[in-house]
């Protein structure tokens, strides 16, 4: 009798697994395990999202267990979704190379991949922060890859430090004191800028933003992470044009995420404390080239001073409601990186100011 019962329970279990039976998500639960269609915690850290023809594609760093987990042993993972709650594993969009001489050799550091679609070339373009194998965080390069399909496979093109030999662009009215002078650099940050002028500027934590007019911008932590650069990309999105501005000079901003609402540009970033959380910071600007105004911490309530344990990675325009946005952050697990969690929270606007609050669970009706 007992054996028969066991057999019955086992068969029911098998049936459920075989038919892929699993509860569909109908809400976001920030910080909790978030399973894909195969029942596996989503592996797309430091990620970003591309919307293309009614489907959302989430790209992020594929991490593994244990100490080596933050190095790129696999590549950039892609997931697809129609509703933002339930994600289908689309596999590895960009694989690291078995060739140890490749810039993206297995074991390198490949972080914060962001994919955009170029309507002119009809290509999907992926930018990422790249550190060469065995060199720690010293290379500080931007890498770029391209694909014909959103899910890849992406082909690696090149990696480099942007804007070699070029001075920043300044909007009219920028005080002389804020303009870097490489004959006589006056701050630490200016010194790093001038040091890197011949070979190109360092490019670490990053994002890519496509404006309404189709122009794209690469925003990255530069100058030993002291200053953000916002640099224009060429019409095919595969190169830097050489026009760039420096933002919040010397203040160590990382993890930039940009969005635009009613003609105003907004950026959320973090401070610079490695895998440990710190207070988020936000900025706004009327022109993408600035001036970018520092606005303080957008987070409020319990946990706000440490971004609820997370660090920004992307801001996604919410479906169905123009002008509504989702803040995406990573809660890193440096001892076991594959266990890193995702914190998605709604962004509120109050008298022109951003406000993010913690909530254990929420859904897209929040924006209605
Ligand atoms: C963080 C950064 C991550 C990663 C990490 C390494 O500050 O945002 O992307 O580079 O440092 O310590």
Image (spheres, helix red, strand yellow):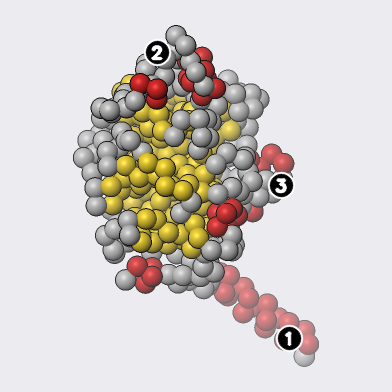
- Residue that lies at the very extreme toward the bottom in this rendered image: 1
Q: Is mark 1 within 8 Å of ligand 1?
A: no
> Toward the viewer: 365 or 87?
365
Q: Which residue is mark 2?
A: 165
Q: Please identify, in this view, whether the residue under mark 3 or under mark 2 is nearer the observer.
A: 2
Image quarter where the C terminus lies is bottom left
Q: Please identify, in this view, whether the residue under mark 3 or under mark 1 is nearer the observer.
A: 3
Dot 2: element: loop
Q: Is mark 2 within 8 Å of ligand 1?
A: no
Q: Which residue is mark 1?
A: 4
- 16 versus 81 height, above or below: below
> Toward the viewer: 347 or 322?
347
The picture places residue 77, in percent across and down from the top left corner, at 50, 46
Dot 1: element: helix
Please give left or right for residue 309 compared with residue 57 in the image.
Answer: right
**What numbered label is drawn on residue 163?**
none
The alpha-carbon separation of the residues under discs 3 and 2 comes to: 40 Å
Q: Circle 3: is it few (<14), some (14-19), or many (20+) Cα within 10 Å?
A: some
Q: What residue do we see at 37% from left, 17% from top?
A: 167
- 198 versus 208 height, above or below: above
Q: Please identify, in this view, whether the residue under mark 2 or under mark 1 is nearer the observer.
A: 2
Q: Circle 2: is it few (<14), some (14-19), or many (20+) Cα within 10 Å?
A: few
The picture places residue 222, in percent across and down from the top left corner, at 49, 28
The alpha-carbon separation of the residues under discs 2 and 1 comes to: 77 Å
Q: What residue do we see at 60% from left, 28% from top?
A: 137
Q: Are marks 2 and 1 in contact (CB under 8 Å)?
A: no
Image quarter where the N terminus lies is bottom right
Q: Quadrant of residue 207?
A: top left
Q: Which residue is mark 3?
A: 335
The picture places residue 329, in percent across and down from the top left corner, at 51, 52
In this rendering, does residue 351 appear at all?
yes
Mark 3 vs 2, N-terminal side: 2
């Amino acid at each position: 009798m007992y054996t028969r019962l066991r057999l019955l329970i086992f068969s029911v279990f098998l049936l459920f697994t075989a038919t892929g039976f699993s509860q569909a998500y109908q809400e976001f639960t920030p910080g909790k395990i978030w399973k894909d269609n195969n029942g596996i915690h989503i592996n797309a850290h430091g990620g970003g999202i591309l919307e293309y023809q009614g489907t959302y594609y989430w790209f992020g760093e594929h991490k593994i267990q244990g100490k080596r987990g933050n190095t790129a042993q696999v590549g950039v993972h892609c997931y697809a979704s129609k509703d933002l709650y339930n994600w289908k594993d689309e596999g590895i969009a960009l694989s690291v190379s078995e060739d140890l001489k490749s810039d993206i050799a297995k074991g390198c550091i490949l972080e914060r991949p962001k994919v955009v679609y170029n309507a002119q070339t009809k290509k999907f373009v992926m930018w990422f922060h790249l550190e060469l194998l065995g060199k720690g965080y010293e290379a500080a390069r931007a890498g770029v890859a391209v694909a014909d399909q959103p899910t890849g496979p992406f082909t690696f093109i090149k990696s480099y430090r942007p804007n070699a030999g070029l001075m920043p662009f300044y909007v009219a009215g920028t005080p002389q004191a804020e303009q870097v002078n490489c004959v006589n650099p006056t701050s630490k940050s200016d010194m790093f800028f001038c040091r890197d002028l011949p070979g190109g500027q360092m490019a670490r934590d990053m994002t890519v933003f496509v404006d309404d007019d189709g122009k794209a911008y690469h925003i990255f932590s530069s100058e030993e992470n002291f200053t953000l650069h916002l640099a224009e990309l060429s019409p095919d999105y595969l190169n830097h044009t050489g026009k760039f501005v420096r933002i919040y000079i010397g203040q160590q901003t990382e993890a930039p995420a940009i969005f635009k609402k009613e003609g105003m540009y907004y950026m959320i970033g973090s401070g610079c404390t490695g895998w440990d959380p710190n207070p988020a910071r936000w900025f706004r600007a009327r022109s993408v080239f600035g001036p970018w105004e520092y606005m303080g911490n957008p987070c409020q309530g319990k946990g706000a001073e440490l971004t609820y344990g997370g660090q920004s990675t992307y801001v996604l325009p919410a479906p169905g409601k123009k002008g509504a946005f989702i803040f995406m952050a990573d809660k890193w697990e440096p001892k076991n990186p594959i266990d890193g969690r995702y914190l998605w929270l709604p962004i509120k606007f109050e008298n022109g100011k951003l406000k993010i609050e913690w909530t254990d669970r929420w859904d897209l009706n929040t924006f209605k």
